[in-house]
Image: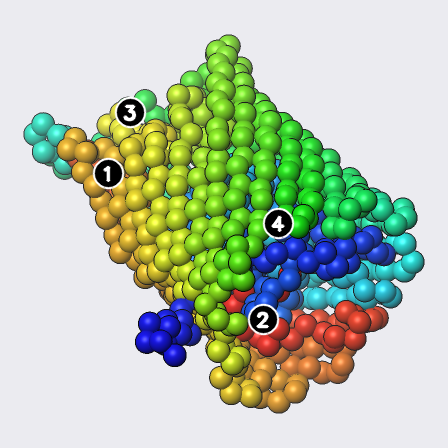
């Protein structure tokens, strides 16, 4: 063997990549995959069925797929909990999602956008929907041309919902009781017979979370250097009840056509109580304000989705056309009552009693079509999209007379903003083999976007529109039967959302207000990734080098609008660069022990907002996860998950590292019934720390939430399942329990 090849093969088992090599279209396989059976293929955008000369995990050319069905904690977890176990994904206690430190993450459901996963609705959905409804999680760091840019425009996390379409009937019921009144339950059932397949799920959850926080803020006079300080401390508790359902039906009309329909609804209500204490002093140390505020919150969230689709098989082998129409919406209503008890009343302080009504609405109409045709040399895919996304942000602030309790509108804090985002898009991709070892997938997407903004309260209307060409490319090379190199590039844009564009100043609390910026431009992002993937025995190994550059970056900018009140707004703030090394290792190291490890060593640099010298701030961040699954005997298993997130940057500062640990025990009581015990945040270490440093502002903020949560539950299964595959067992990832990219 030549020396250079032996060196490559020695290095390859230590590293792995993200992307599955595209292979030439196999006509017989394509025909079989496209043939309409009792149940159709998922409507998640897919590449055509291909044959691969090498046997390796079924990562697809543009994404990594993580099979989450085997996670024994899924019978209790929410989707947010499960995402926190996926490599390089992090979800904080407020439902904010990051991927490799990036916050503009787009979350899709079965490959399509949904109103419940956009804006302020996302956090409530992620913390309510049960993980038991998930089939897999797909991470798409460099999205191809078939993916649009609405709802984030950055990397994509695709939630593939559970599907059970083998002939017969199947059902499962999960119920868990937690500490301090917490409870959750879910059920899933399916039936497939003849031309018809039906499945559905129900869930309910009650949760209670407390938190405490402290913020120390220094206001700096840039001319004299004088510093005025303030301190805000808080205590809060929130009780949340949520419930929902989803269902789907598919029907085979004949040899060429399959129709499908889906529907879902979820609702949650949250009751919150909090107490904040404020104390502020001027540069000489004299107290300017000191008071306590009590807050009562009542929030209701409603989300729905409806869709109909048609899959039509063409006359040529592997030829297929898919089209669907989707409607989704969400409605978040909040009633917040404030009571201020002043010891030292600040200038321009509000009335002791006030109330705020909030309404956030989102509606999406999405009509798409995808045409796929294998040829002799490759696979052609074309598609279109017509979408309309409408958003409403309505805030009413009321002053209450302490004597009569009469409510009068506060015009300075009352506002209604409406945004209509219309998108027209066309895309095309072509996938082919170049010889036996090379594969390529290239694509181009063209998007036209029209924005109509209406500041209803002030009567100001504005609009904007732009046309973008969005290319992507994927290249693969097979080093051996088990090892491949992957190279990918994608250009994306992040369009600002309704809250980013609304210019009206919205009240948050006595020290903080926020507003958007209607002059924001989209952020452009270029990302490049090189990886190696291999399999050595039972161990799957992936290593990926990545780099990204963002221009016209949309960042938070904060400045004082009075001596004590800080305004948070948005602006395009130059550029940012980042890169790093991501790895995953997963496999069974002994007959009883499975270890899944992942990590990310990243470097980021971006412009510092609020800095007169246009300085850059940089950070090196190390994040890692490790999952240890031990099968004592056929009836007993234990799972420990360790999670660490490194330092991350934002426009004016950075967030400190975090660490947590989760424990799960499962005992099989019978073939159908299992006992499950979950302990989340074993060491009660969950907290969020952020530090802001600019020419005019220094701030340290820490927030701690109820961390350690204990649940005990039962999972009962009945009917047939997966053609006799048996129930879900412990593990997370591909078959065999590894936390690596699993098959779809």
Task: Give SS at disc 4.
Answer: strand
Of marks 1 and 2, the one in the foreground: 2
Camera-near label (3 vs 4) is: 4
Residue positioned 63% across, 29% down in the render: 387
When the figure is inspected, residue 412 is found, relative to residue 230, above or below; the finding is: above
Q: CA distance from mark 3 to mark 2?
A: 62 Å
Mark 1–mark 2 distance (CA, rounded to whole Å): 48 Å
Label annotation for residue 55? 2
Q: Nearer the viewer, residue 273 or 529?
A: 529
The residue that mark 1 highlights is 608
Q: In this figure, which residue is indicated by the disc labeled 3? A: 561
Q: Earlier in the sequence, mark 3 or mark 4?
A: 4
Report the coloring of the rendering: rainbow
Tell whether label 4 touches label 2 (CB within 8 Å). no
Marks 2 and 4, how far apart in space?
20 Å
Decide which of tag 1 and tag 2 comes sooner along the chain: 2
> In front: mark 3 or mark 2?
2
Q: Residue at x 82, y 49 (%)?
A: 249
Residue bearing the label numbered 4? 378
Q: Mark 4 or mark 1, which is nearer to you?
A: 4
Pick the residue in front: 502 or 254: 254
């Amino acid at each position: 063997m030549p020396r250079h090849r032996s060196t490559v093969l020695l290095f390859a088992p230590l590293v792995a990549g993200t992307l599955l090599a595209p292979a030439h279209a196999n006509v017989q396989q394509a025909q079989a995959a496209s043939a309409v059976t009792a149940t159709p293929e998922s409507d998640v955008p897919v590449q055509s069925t291909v044959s691969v000369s090498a046997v390796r995990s079924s990562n697809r050319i543009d994404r990594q797929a993580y099979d989450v069905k085997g996670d024994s904690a899924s019978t209790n977890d929410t989707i947010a909990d499960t995402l926190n176990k996926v490599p390089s994904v992090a979800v904080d206690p407020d439902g904010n999602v990051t991927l490799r430190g990036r916050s503009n993450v787009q979350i899709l459901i079965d490959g399509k956008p949904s109103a419940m996963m956009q804006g302020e609705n996302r956090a409530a959905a992620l913390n309510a929907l049960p993980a038991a409804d998930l089939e897999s999680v797909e991470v798409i760091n460099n999205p191809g041309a078939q993916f649009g840019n609405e709802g984030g425009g950055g990397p994509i996390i695709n939630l593939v919902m559970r599907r059970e379409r083998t002939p017969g009937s199947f059902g499962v019921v999960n119920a868990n009781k937690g500490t301090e009144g917490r409870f959750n339950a879910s059920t899933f059932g399916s039936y497939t017979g003849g031309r018809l397949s039906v499945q559905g799920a129900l869930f309910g959850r009650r949760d209670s979370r407390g938190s405490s926080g402290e913020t120390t803020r220094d206001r700096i006079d840039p001319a004299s250097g004088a510093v005025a300080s303030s301190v805000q401390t808080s205590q809060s508790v929130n009780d949340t009840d949520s419930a929902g359902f989803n269902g789907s039906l598919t029907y085979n009309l004949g040899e060429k056509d399959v129709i499908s329909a889906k529907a879902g609804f979820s609702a949650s209500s949250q009751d919150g109580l909090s107490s904040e204490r404020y104390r502020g002093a001027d540069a000489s140390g004299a107290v300017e304000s000191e008071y306590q505020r009590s807050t009562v919150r009542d929030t209701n969230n409603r989300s729905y989705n409806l869709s109909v689709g048609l899959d039509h098989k063409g006359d040529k082998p592997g030829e297929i056309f898919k089209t669907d129409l989707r409607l989704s919406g969400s409605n978040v209503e909040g009633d917040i009552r404030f009571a201020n008890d002043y010891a030292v009343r600040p200038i321009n302080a509000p009335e002791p009693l006030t109330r705020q009504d909030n309404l956030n609405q989102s509606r999406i109409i999405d009509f798409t079509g995808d045409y796929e045709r294998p040829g002799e040399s490759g696979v052609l895919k074309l598609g279109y999209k017509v979408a309309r996304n409408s958003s409403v942000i309505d805030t009413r602030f009321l002053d209450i007379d302490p004597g009569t309790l009469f409510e009068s509108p506060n015009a300075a804090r009352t506002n209604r903003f409406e945004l209509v985002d219309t998108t027209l898009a066309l895309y095309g991709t072509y996938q082919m083999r170049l010889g036996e070892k090379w594969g390529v997938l290239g694509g181009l997407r063209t998007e036209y976007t029209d924005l109509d903004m209406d500041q209803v309260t002030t009567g100001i209307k504005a609009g904007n529109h732009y046309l973008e060409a969005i290319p992507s490319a994927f290249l693969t090379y097979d080093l051996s039967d088990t090892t491949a190199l992957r190279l990918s590039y994608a250009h994306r844009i992040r369009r600002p959302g309704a809250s980013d564009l609304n210019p009206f100043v919205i009240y948050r609390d006595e020290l903080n207000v926020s507003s958007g910026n209607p002059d924001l431009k989209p952020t452009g992002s270029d990302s490049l990734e090189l990886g190696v993937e291999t399999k050595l025995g039972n161990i799957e190994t992936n290593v990926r080098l990545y780099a990204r550059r963002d221009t016209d970056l949309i960042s938070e900018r904060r400045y004082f609008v009075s001596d004590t009140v800080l305004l948070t707004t948005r602006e395009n703030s130059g550029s940012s660069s980042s890169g790093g090394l991501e790895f995953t290792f997963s496999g069974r190291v002994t007959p009883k022990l499975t270890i899944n490890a992942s990590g990310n060593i990243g470097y980021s640099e971006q412009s510092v907002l609020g800095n007169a010298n246009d300085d850059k701030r940089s950070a090196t961040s190390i994040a890692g996860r490790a999952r240890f699954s031990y099968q004592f005997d056929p009836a007993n298993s234990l799972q420990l998950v360790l999670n660490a997130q490194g330092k991350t940057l934002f426009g004016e500062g950075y967030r400190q590292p975090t660490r947590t640990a989760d424990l799960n025990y499962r005992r099989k009581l019978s073939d159908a019934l299992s006992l499950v015990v979950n302990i989340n945040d074993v060491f009660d270490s969950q907290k969020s720390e952020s530090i802001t440093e600019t020419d005019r502002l220094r701030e340290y903020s820490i927030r701690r939430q109820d961390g350690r949560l204990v649940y005990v539950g039962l999972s009962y299964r009945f009917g047939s399942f997966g053609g006799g595959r048996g129930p879900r067992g412990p593990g997370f990832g591909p078959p065999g329990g590894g936390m690596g990219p699993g098959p779809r």
